Image: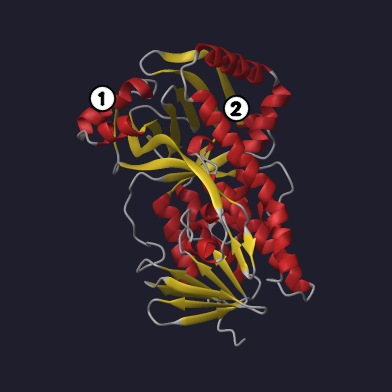
């Protein structure tokens, strides 16, 4: 096969762009194919979206050369407070408090706004001579052969690559064309997402407040602002989202509380339905999946993007090591190493977020008592508490080099 790129990445969002930058460090020719006219927006305005970037994910961004462009707009996440209760009643006396000073590595992570992360990735991709961007076109055909994969695009172009990576989200066309099936279900919940300005400083503390309809996350941004991810039943969320801004805030206030003073909206409001999605496989002949294309989880722990970045770090390392050994980096036995590395972690994360959501998003008095006692017990045991903190920071398990702050 006559290749016109080494690796074709379908999907130009956060995962696709980050993967391209990692693979470009290996001297490979990378092509990003994205259906949108521009793969990532360089000058997007503030829309309220943000990501909780775990400590190890921050190391990866630094290894990709992005941290200098992000650091000034990244809010350190110093503490996490987890409480349980009902709207307007205040939190239960049982809680979990994770303090970053109990681990040696520093902040548990950073909150970074979507607009800043996308802009940094866009500029880095545009400046990298190893990366080509084919935007405004969709893949209509995908054929894997013994030596490579051929992609046919709806603008008439044909790409021939050694490997095709699907970074094209939960409805991944790459996965469908490769015959990869998935399991999943809707939660009957919708997330309401916005940014809030508040009178008092947040001190770098992230809050997770569990209520019967679903959790409310209050995530600190730079300045006196916080990002809100607020889960309600589908019907209730639709009714709330139909309200004007003042009425919307009136519904939020008893859930939010007054610990940060008066609040106001500081960006657009939007919603998205919550579901779980997990593929039966992360690989197929000449195909690999990363991020939401392989696994989509409930945002209850803010781990969706972090899981995708862990996929990227592992795939980059597997390809780097195979290349140095003179192997075909897209051979079945090489891609199996990637899947073996990531599949258990992703399945465990999906199970954990699903279990937590079902356990906390209900008003059964026996379950409420059990979970409150459990939170109190975890908070009272320093060793167990530190274990949870290390997990949240991404410090557990077999970490790829990029997540350890080491070069590929």
Distance of mark 1 from mark 2, alpha carbons?
A: 30 Å
Quarter of the picture holding the C terminus? bottom right
Q: Residue at x 35, y 34 (%)?
A: 234
Marks 1 and 2: CB-CB under 8 Å?
no
Residue where numbered disc 1 is placed: 250
Task: Say how the picture is coloured.
Answer: secondary structure
Disc marking residue 319:
none
**x then y, percent, for residue 93:** 52, 11
Q: Residue at x 32, y 26 (%)?
A: 252
Q: Is residue 174 left or right of residue 213?
A: right
- Which quadrant holds residue 34? bottom left
Q: Is residue 323 above or below residue 90?
A: below
Residue where numbered disc 2 is placed: 98
Give SS at disc 2: strand
Q: Is residue 262 left or right of residue 24?
A: left
Q: Is residue 235 above or below residue 110?
A: above
Q: Residues within 10 Å of mark 2 (few under 14, many from 20)?
A: many
Q: Residues within 10 Å of mark 1 (few under 14, many from 20)?
A: few
Q: Is residue 330 above or below residue 183?
A: below
Quarter of the picture holding the N terminus? bottom right
One can see residue 285 in this view: yes
Relative to the observer, which residue lies in front, 77 or 175? 175
Q: Residue at x 70, y 19 (%)?
A: 381
- Which quadrant holds residue 290? bottom right
């Amino acid at each position: 096969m006559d290749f016109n790129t080494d690796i074709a990445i379908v999907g130009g969002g956060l995962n696709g762009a980050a993967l391209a930058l990692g693979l470009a460090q290996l001297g490979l020719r990378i092509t990003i194919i994205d259906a949108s006219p521009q793969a990532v927006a360089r000058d997007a305005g503030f829309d309220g979206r943000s990501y909780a970037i775990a400590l190890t994910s921050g190391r990866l961004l630094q290894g990709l050369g992005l941290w200098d462009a992000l650091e000034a707009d990244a809010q350190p996440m110093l503490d996490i407070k987890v409480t349980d209760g009902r709207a307007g009643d205040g939190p239960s006396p049982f809680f979990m408090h994770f303090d970053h000073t109990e681990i040696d590595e520093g902040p548990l992570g950073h909150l970074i706004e979507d607009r800043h992360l996308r802009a940094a990735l866009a500029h880095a991709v545009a400046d990298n001579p190893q990366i080509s961007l084919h935007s405004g076109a969709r893949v209509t055909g995908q054929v894997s052969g013994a030596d490579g994969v051929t992609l046919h695009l709806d603008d008439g172009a044909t790409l021939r690559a050694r490997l095709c990576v699907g970074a094209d989200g939960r409805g991944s066309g790459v996965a469908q064309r490769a015959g990869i099936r998935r399991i999943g279900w809707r939660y009957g919940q919708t997330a309401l997402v916005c940014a809030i300005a508040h009178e008092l400083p947040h001190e770098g503390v992230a809050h997770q407040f569990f209520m019967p309809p679903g959790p409310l996350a209050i995530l600190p941004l730079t300045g006196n602002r916080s990002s809100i991810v607020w889960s309600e039943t589908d019907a209730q969320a639709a009714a709330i989202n139909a309200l004007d801004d003042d009425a919307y805030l009136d519904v939020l206030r008893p859930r939010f509380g007054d610990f940060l003073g008066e609040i106001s909206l500081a960006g657009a409001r939007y919603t998205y339905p919550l579901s779980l999605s997990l593929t039966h496989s992360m690989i197929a002949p000449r195909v690999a999946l990363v991020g939401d294309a392989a696994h989509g989880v409930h945002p209850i722990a803010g781990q969706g993007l972090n899981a995708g970045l862990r996929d990227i770090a592992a795939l980059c390392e597997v390809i780097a090591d195979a290349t140095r050994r003179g192997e075909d980096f897209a051979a079945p036995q090489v891609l199996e190493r990637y899947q073996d590395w990531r599949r258990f972690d992703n399945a465990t994360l999906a199970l954990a977020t699903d279990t937590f959501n079902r356990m906390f998003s209900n008003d059964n008095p026996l379950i409420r008592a059990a979970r409150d006692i459990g939170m109190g017990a975890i908070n009272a045991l320093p060793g167990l508490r530190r274990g949870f903190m290390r997990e949240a920071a991404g410090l557990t398990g077999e970490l790829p080099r990029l997540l350890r702050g080491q070069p590929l």
